[in-house]
Image: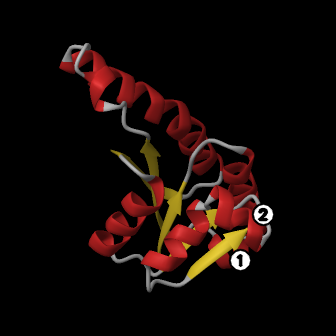
C-alpha cells in the first residue's frame, strides 16, 4: 500500500508516527510511505528584499527541520519512506500532492478541535478531507 503522511513537526505528527509504530501489523515495513511537509511561503513583500538563494535555503532548512526526525523514525522502524517538501498552503498542497501521487491512504495527525473551533481556526485535516477523495485516517 502507498501511504501519504503529511507532517509538520508538531506533537500531532508525533502522534501519527506513534500510531503507525504501535500498529505494525497494519502499517509495517511492507508499505511505501511518502512524507510531505508544506513550508509556509514568505510573503511577497518580504521576499522582495531577499535574494533568491537565501529564500530557497530558508525553505530547505525549514523542511529539513521537520523531515529529519521523520527519516530517523522510518529508519528505526525499517519503513520505506521518501520525503518531499513544497511551499504554500498546507491543505491545498497536500491535496494537490495526493492527486498527483495517488496514494491508497493518507494518515494525518489532528489537534482535535471541536467543529466550532475548526470554523474559526481552520484545520489542515479538515481541509485535506474536503479536497481529497482518498481514504484518510485522522489520528488524534
Q: Residue at x 27, y 70 (%)?
A: 100
Q: If the image is split into quadrants, where does the C terminus sit?
A: bottom right
Residue 39 visible (yes or no)? yes
**49 over 91 or under it: above or below:** above
Q: Residue at x 70, y 61 (%)?
A: 110
Q: Earlier in the sequence, mark 2 or mark 1?
A: 1
Q: Is residue 98 left or right of residue 110?
A: left
The picture places residue 99, in percent across and down from the top left corner, at 32, 74
The picture places residue 83, in percent across and down from the top left corner, at 42, 49
In the image, 81 versus 47, the foreground residue is 47
Q: Is residue 6 left or right of residue 83?
A: right
**Residue 121 figure quarter:** bottom right
| Residue neighbourhood size for the residue with mark 2, other residues' Cα within 10 Å, grouped as few (<14), some (14–19), many (≥20) | few
**Residue 119 figure quarter:** bottom right
Residue 1 visible (yes or no)? no
Closer to the eye: label 2 or 1: 2
In the image, 18 versus 51, the foreground residue is 51
Q: Which residue is mark 2?
A: 113
Q: Residue at x 50, y 78 (%)?
A: 130
Q: Secondary structure at mark 1?
A: helix
Q: Are marks 2 and 1 in contact (CB under 8 Å)?
A: no
Number of callouts:
2
Q: Secondary structure at mark 2?
A: loop
Q: Residue at x 56, y 51 (%)?
A: 7
The picture places residue 77, in percent across and down from the top left corner, at 65, 54
Q: Which residue is mark 1?
A: 25
| Residue neighbourhood size for the residue with mark 1, other residues' Cα within 10 Å, grouped as few (<14), some (14–19), many (≥20) | few
Amino acid at each position: 500500500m502507498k501511504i501519504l503522511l503529511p507532517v509538520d513537526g508538531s506533537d500531532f505528527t508525533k502522534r501519527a508516527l506513534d500510531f503507525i509504530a504501535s500498529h505494525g501489523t497494519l502499517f509495517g515495513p511492507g508499505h511505501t510511505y511518502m512524507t510531505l511537509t508544506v513550508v509556509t511561503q514568505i510573503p511577497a513583500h518580504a521576499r522582495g528584499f531577499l535574494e533568491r538563494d537565501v529564500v530557497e535555503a530558508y525553505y530547505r532548512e525549514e523542511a529539513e527541520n521537520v523531515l529529519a526526525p521523520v527519516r530517523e523514525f522510518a529508519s528505526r522502524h525499517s519503513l520505506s519512506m521518501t520525503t518531499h517538501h513544497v511551499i504554500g498552503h498546507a491543505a491545498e498542497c497536500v491535496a494537490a500532492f495526493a492527486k498527483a501521487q495517488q496514494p491508497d491512504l493518507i494518515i494525518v495527525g489532528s489537534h482535535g478541535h471541536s467543529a466550532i473551533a475548526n470554523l474559526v481556526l481552520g484545520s489542515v485535516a479538515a481541509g485535506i478531507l474536503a479536497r481529497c477523495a482518498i481514504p484518510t485516517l485522522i489520528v488524534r
